[in-house]
Amino acid sequence: MYAFDGKPTYAAGDLDYLKTNAEGREFTDRLIDREGDLSLKAEVHRFRMITSELERMEMVLVENEEAWGQLAAAKLGAIRQLEMADANARINTNNQGFVDDALCVNEELLHGCKG
């Protein structure tokens, strides 16, 4: 069980020297090895792996945000084109005609069956 009373708390920037791509990493690794504590070495390794994955995910999110913006703009453009073509009215006109045709066919079938 950890006792946190009296232990320091670190701001994120205080640990930048532990990152995988930090300048002087080899020296830092030698200092950690010199401490001789495998738990410390494991915690630093864990920090590095999580930090590296977080940085990779941040890049993916930024790229996806840009792609999302482009797709959202393209969708708005497509909506504008549909508005200019008055697509809803034209489709609904055909829909009404389709319903009328279906009713006529149904009526013809009903009259054919009665006769």
Image: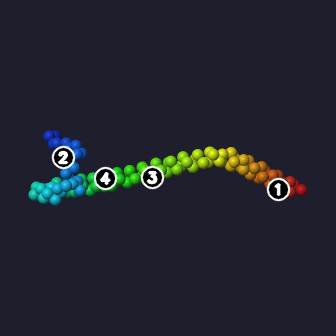
Which residue in the structure is indicated by mark 3? Answer: 67
Among the 4 quarters of the image, the one containing residue 46:
bottom left
Tell me the crowding category of disc 2: few under 14, some 14 to 19, or many 20 or more residues within 10 angstroms, Cα based: few
Mark 3 vs mark 2: give the one in front.
3
Residue at image point 62% right, 48% down:
82
The CA distance from mark 2 to mark 1 is 83 Å
Circle 4 crowding by C-alpha within 10 Å: few under 14, some 14–19, many from 20: few
Name the residue tied to disc 2: 2
Q: Which comes before the other along the chain, label 2 or label 1?
A: 2
Of labels 3 and 2, earlier in sequence is 2
Q: Position of residue 59 (x, y in %)?
A: 35, 53
Please name the residue that numbered disc 1 is placed on: 109
Q: Which residue, given by chain and number where applicable, does mark 4 sit on?
A: 55
In this rendering, the label closer to the viewer, 1 or 4: 4
Spot occupied by residue 101 in the image (x, y as percentages of width and height): 78, 52
For the residues labelled 4 and 3, the Cα–Cα distance comes to: 19 Å
Q: Name the residue type under label 3.
A: Ala
Q: Please, which residue is most extreme toward the right here?
A: 115
Q: Is residue 37 visible?
A: no
Above or below — where is 38 with respect to 76? below
Q: Amino acid at mark 1?
A: Leu
Mark 4 or mark 2: whose residue is earlier in sequence: 2
Q: Of residues 77 and 53, which is closer to you in this image? A: 77
Please tell me whether mark 3 sits on a helix, a strand or a loop: helix
What percent of the width, then of the height, locates residue 92?
Answer: 69, 47
Q: Residues within 10 Å of mark 3 (few under 14, many from 20)?
A: few
Residue at the (18%, 46%) spot, across then down: 2
Dot placed on the residue nearer the N-terminal end, 4 or 3 = 4
